[in-house]
Image (cartoon, rainbow, N blue to C red):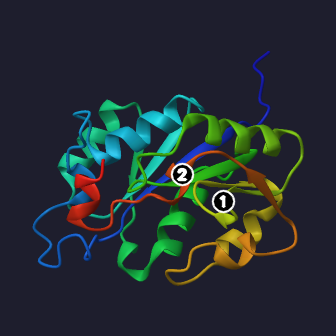
């Protein structure tokens, strides 16, 4: 008999427009190459794959090169036709595609410097019964974050570009102290690549 116990899934949000990186929209910041030779999105995907076997990447339409990078890292990829609405649309898409999961680690593809140990710590807290988990470094919250399936109805109601910020600020959120500055480092502007 097959084991049908729900598993945790990672959702990698890759559908932003990156307008601060390139206002003209000519360069996809997620395809930029880091000092180690990996693309921004590829390294973010690889980190998640080292922690969870199933990673679903959500992309905006018209990004075949990004899809190829993500698939080469072993991700499932889904296109969010409503990505322009904001991050909540991409998150909802990912959740709807994995609604049978026990819970989710949600990561941002433009944050390639997160230590896998951070993701493992968040996942461990979820498996021990925490409903919402968020990493904290030097007193500041960061990414990725995690939710168990109890929060699926609230997550599916999110709107706009704030993502799950209100849920993460709730008293129910468990802050996990980490020694990982990567939870605050994103690739937002071209100079952020130079700092790698």
Q: Is residue 171 left or right of residue 83?
A: right
User: Mark on residue 138?
Assistant: 1
Residue under circle 2?
Answer: 181
* Identity of the residue drawn at 20% across and 50% down: 32
Kind of element beneath mark 2: helix
Are dots 2 and 1 in contact, CB under 8 Å?
A: yes
> Could you tell whether 133 is left or right of 105 in the image?
right
> Which residue appears at 30% of the width and 47% of the height?
196
The residue furthest top is: 1
Q: Quadrant of residue 22?
A: bottom left
Q: Visible in this render: residue 19?
A: yes
Is residue 148 in sight in this rendering?
no
Left or right for 61, reference 107: left
Give the mark, 2 or 1, whose residue is nearer the N terminus: 1
Residue at 30% of width from left, 31% of height from top?
72
Task: Estimate how packed mark 2 is, as few (under 14), some (14 to 19) or many (20 or more) residues with alpha carbons within 10 Å.
Answer: some
| Spot occupied by residue 4 in the image (x, y as percentages of width and height) | 77, 30
Residue at the spot 23% in from the left edge and 70% down from the top edge: 21
Q: Quadrant of the N terminus?
A: top right
């Amino acid at each position: 008999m097959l084991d049908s116990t729900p598993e945790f899934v990672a959702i990698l949000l890759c559908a932003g427009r990156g307008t601060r990186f390139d206002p003209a929209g000519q360069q996809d910041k997620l395809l930029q190459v880091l000092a180690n030779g990996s693309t921004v999105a590829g390294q973010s995907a690889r980190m998640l794959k080292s922690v969870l076997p199933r990673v679903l990447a959500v992309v905006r339409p018209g990004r075949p090169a990004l899809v190829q990078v993500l698939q080469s890292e072993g991700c499932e990829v889904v296109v969010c036709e409503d990505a322009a609405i904001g991050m909540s649309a991409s998150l909802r898409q990912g959740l709807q595609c994995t609604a049978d999961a026990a819970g989710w680690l949600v990561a941002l593809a433009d944050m390639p410097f997160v230590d896998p140990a951070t993701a493992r710590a968040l996942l461990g807290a979820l498996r021990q019964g925490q409903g919402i988990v968020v990493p904290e470094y030097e007193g500041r919250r960061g990414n990725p974050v995690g939710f168990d399936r109890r929060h699926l109805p609230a997550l599916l109601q999110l709107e706009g570009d704030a993502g799950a910020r209100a849920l993460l600020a709730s008293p129910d959120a468990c802050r996990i102290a980490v020694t990982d500055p990567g939870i605050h480092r994103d690739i937002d502007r071209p100079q952020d690549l130079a700092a790698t």
